[in-house]
Each structure stands twice: as C-alpha cells, then as structure tokens.
Image (cartoon, grey):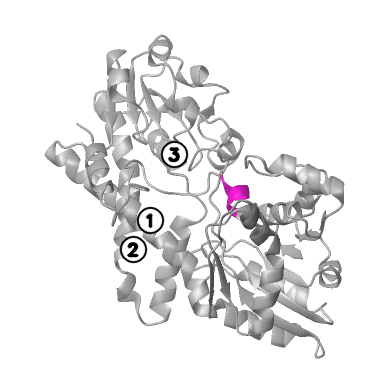
C-alpha cells in the first residue's frame, strides 16, 4: 500500500501498517520530511513511533519517496492522508492538498487500484475525488474510491491504528470492500489473537465522510457544555469538578470529556467543526449546526477567563508582571501547538504587558516558532523562577505531580491558576499557594 502524505496521520499509518506486516511506501512532496523519515527520524513527537519506524525501515517493509510515479507502480491500495486545514478567510476546509495528491498519483496508474480517503473532509469529497480521477487517470486505468476515516488520538496514535475501536468503510462496490478487508487483515488477526472484536461499519460515501466530523463535533460540544457549566458555577459559587463527577455517573452522559478547563484545541476539533458548519451552509442546512458556533465561542471565552484569573491574582493588571506558563501543546504527550489553548493564553498574557516564560516538555521548539515574542525555559523550575503567578495550561504528568512546597521556594509569589483543573487544590493551598481553578470556588 502507499500512504499519500507523511504528516501526523500519514506517517503513523505508514509505520503502523508496516508493523502489521504490509509492504508500505510513504509519499510526500516535502523532501526534508522524507529524508528524515528515511533516516529513521519521526518529525513530530508521538510515543513509541520512533522505535517502530526504525524497526520497519530495517526490515525493508517500509520506504519513503517523493516520486508519485513510483507510488503508482508500487501500490494496490493508496491511502490519502494529507492535511485539510482551514481555508484562509473562510470557515471551510482547504482541499488543495487532496486534489494535488490524487491528481499526481492517478495520472500514473495504468492498472487496477483503490484510492482510499482517510483525511477529514467535507461530505461530498469522495464523489469529487471520483471526478478528479475521471479527469486525470489514463483511459485504461481501473481506479475505484473508498472512504475510511481516521480516529487517531494524539499521544495514542499507534495504539489507535493497531487496535482501532471501529473501522468505517465507505464503498460503492464489493471489490472495494474486499480490498479494504485485505488491507486490514493484520488488524483483524491481531484482534483475534487478543480475543477482541473490531466492529466494521460498511456504508456509503456520505455517511463515512460524516462520521469523523460528527464525532469531533459531539466531543467539542461535550467539552464546551462542561465549560459553560463552569461559567455558571463561577457565578453561583459551585464546584464544576464535583458537578461533572455527579452527572458523569449517568450512563447516558458518561464522565469522559467532562473536565472543565481552558478548552479544546489542536489540528482537528477547531477546524473540523468550522468546516462542518461551512459545508452545512452550502447544503442549505446551516441552521442545523448553528449550535456549533456557540460551542466555538464558549471554547474561546475560557481562554480569556484564564487570563482574567491570572490578573485577579496579581492585583488586577498583568502589565509589568512576570508570569510562568506551564504548557504550550494543546494536550500532553504531543508536541502539537496548532490552535493550542495554552499558546493562545500565553499570547494574551504577553499582549497584556506581562513578561512570559513558557515551559513544555515537548512543545518548546514548535511554540517558539509560533510565538517567538515570549521566553522559553528548559525546566519547570527555570520557568517558575521569580514568577508572580504560575498558569498551568497543559496537563502533563510533570505538572500534575509537581511539588508545591519545592516550587514555592522558586517563585516570587505562590499564586497559581489551574487552567486544566488537573491539580489538587487542597495540596497546593496547604503549601500556602493562592489557587484558582476554572469553575471552582
């Protein structure tokens, strides 16, 4: 199989499928990225992926190239794993990379092949890809399309590829379904060996395309719901962590994604819910997704609330104050700072006139490129030195288990804003810290 695009999704999929025993060729136009991967270096942080990359390069099952003609000769199944970022000046998804990868590939295919979309796209994209193939493929080529959305969680992406909680196949023919079954035989065999089942949903193109954006919209809504409750709790003097715990016992609701805090971010949820709204408008059903606009607004308000709490702790104004920011990535176990709430808050604090020092175990380098105006530290203590307030914005284990007594000896004033509600308030208050959490008394 070939994997078109070797970013987060593509590189993880390529390495994981090689680990399952397939011959895999990763394809990308970025020569530097292909060079790194070919040398056994993953260009982003994902636990466990470096070792698997090096092991499968050594076996010869995994290779990388910039040559689409080589990919066309090599593969029976071609996975489209390129990025679909938000279009500049619009809520809609930018599909230029999908178009470029598909057209570059199919004009070189001279036999039978299956092109499988994995990228998160607006509903209707698979039909459009079929049109691109009809326009650009040689007349004698037999190319079909399928859609197989990805459900990777950053920090757990290898596990989610090898042991998916479900597979979705959007197909038009039995041959396409059989090819996907062959492609995932290694996943099925691993599940059987571990006495598990992998649910497979076989459906049409449109439904398959909607699964990922619907799931992301639901998760974003659940996160923003508890953050809306956090706003109410702050006004009423209630504790949102206890509220979330109580309603989470209801099996109809569940306790996952009910942690109030600074909100969601990353390269998926924010841009996906916006693209979903844009596509709904194009389909004439925009009113059905009006609620996602408020989901987005709630998420952004929580970022400002963290800044306000930090200002309250230092007397009302951040100008001239030294602030330590713990966290730059949008979640732990990742170096991804795309649409990161942590970095957005750090920027707001800097814009308010504070001197900001950021520390993240994996994200400093990427954060520095995105926000060069602030300072970066190599350790927790270095970031906290002489700080007048500490703001926790990513729930890394290192931050959750930091020693409040030892840290109090480093800062200028023991004040902390827990933007992820990931700390034990009593523990920090017992160490004489002024503690503020979102939605907590």
Q: CA distance from mark 3 to mark 2?
A: 22 Å
Q: CA distance from mark 1 to mark 2?
A: 8 Å
Residue 72 is at least partly visible in this image: yes
- Residue receiving disc 2: 292
Q: The magenta stretch spans which residues?
A: 156-160
Along the viewing direction, whichever of 81 and 393 lies nearer the viewer: 81
- Residue receiving disc 1: 220
Q: Give coordinates of residue 230: x percent, y percent.
A: 24, 43
- Residue receiving disc 3: 342
Q: Give coordinates of residue 333: x percent, y percent.
A: 55, 38
Q: Is residue 274 above or below residue 107?
A: above
Q: Is residue 69 above or below residue 373?
A: below
Q: Is residue 255 above or below residue 180?
A: above
At x 66%, y 40%, the residue is 48
Our reading of the magenta stretch's main secondary structure is helix
Label 3 packing within 10 angstroms: few (<14), some (14-19), many (20+)? many
């Amino acid at each position: 199989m070939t994997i078109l695009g070797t970013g987060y999704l593509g590189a993880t999929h390529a390495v994981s499928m090689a680990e399952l025993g397939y011959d895999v060729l990763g394809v990308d136009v970025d020569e530097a990225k292909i060079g790194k991967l070919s040398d056994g270096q993953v260009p982003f942080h994902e636990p466990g992926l470096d070792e698997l990359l090096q092991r499968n390069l050594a076996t010869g099952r995994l290779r990388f190239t910039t040559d689409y003609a080589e990919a066309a000769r090599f593969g029976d199944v071609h996975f489209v794993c390129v990025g679909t970022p938000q279009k500049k000046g619009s809520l809609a998804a930018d599909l230029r990379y999908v178009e470029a990868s598909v057209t570059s590939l199919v004009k070189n295919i001279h036999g039978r092949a299956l092109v499988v979309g994995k990228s998160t796209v607006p509903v209707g994209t698979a039909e459009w890809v079929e049109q691109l193939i009809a326009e650009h493929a040689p007349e004698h080529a037999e190319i079909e399309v399928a859609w197989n959305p990805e459900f990777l969680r950053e920090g757990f992406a290898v596990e989610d590829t090898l042991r998916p909680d479900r597979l979705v196949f959007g197909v038009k023919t039995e041959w396409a379904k059989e090819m996907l079954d062959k492609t995932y035989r290694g996943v099925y065999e691993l599940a059987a060996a571990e006495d598990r089942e992998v649910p497979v949903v076989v459906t049409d193109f449109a439904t398959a395309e909607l699964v990922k954006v619907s799931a992301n919209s639901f998760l974003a809504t659940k996160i923003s719901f508890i953050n809306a409750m956090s706003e109410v709790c702050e006004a009423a003097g209630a504790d949102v962590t206890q509220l979330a715990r109580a309603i989470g016992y209801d099996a109809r609701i569940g306790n996952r994604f009910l942690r109030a805090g600074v909100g969601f971010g990353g390269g998926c949820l924010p841009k996906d819910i916006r693209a979903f709204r844009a596509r709904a408008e194009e389909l004439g059903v925009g009113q059905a997704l009006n609620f996602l606009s408020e989901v987005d607004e709630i998420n952004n308000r929580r970022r400002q609330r963290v800044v306000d709490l930090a200002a309250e702790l230092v007397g009302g104004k951040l100008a001239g104050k030294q602030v330590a920011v713990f966290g730059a990535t949008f979640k732990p176990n990742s170096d991804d700072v795309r649409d990161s709430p942590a970095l957005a808050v750090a920027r707001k604090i800097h814009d308010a006139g504070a001197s900001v020092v950021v520390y993240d175990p994996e994200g400093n380098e990427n954060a520095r490129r995105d926000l060069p105006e602030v300072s970066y530290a190599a350790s927790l203590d270095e970031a906290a030195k002489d700080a007048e307030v500490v703001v926790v914005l990513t729930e890394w284990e290192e931050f959750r288990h930091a020693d409040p007594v030892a840290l109090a000896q480093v800062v200028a004033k023991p004040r902390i804003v827990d933007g992820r509600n990931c700390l034990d308030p009593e523990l920090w208050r017992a160490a004489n810290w002024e503690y503020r959490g979102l939605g907590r008394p």
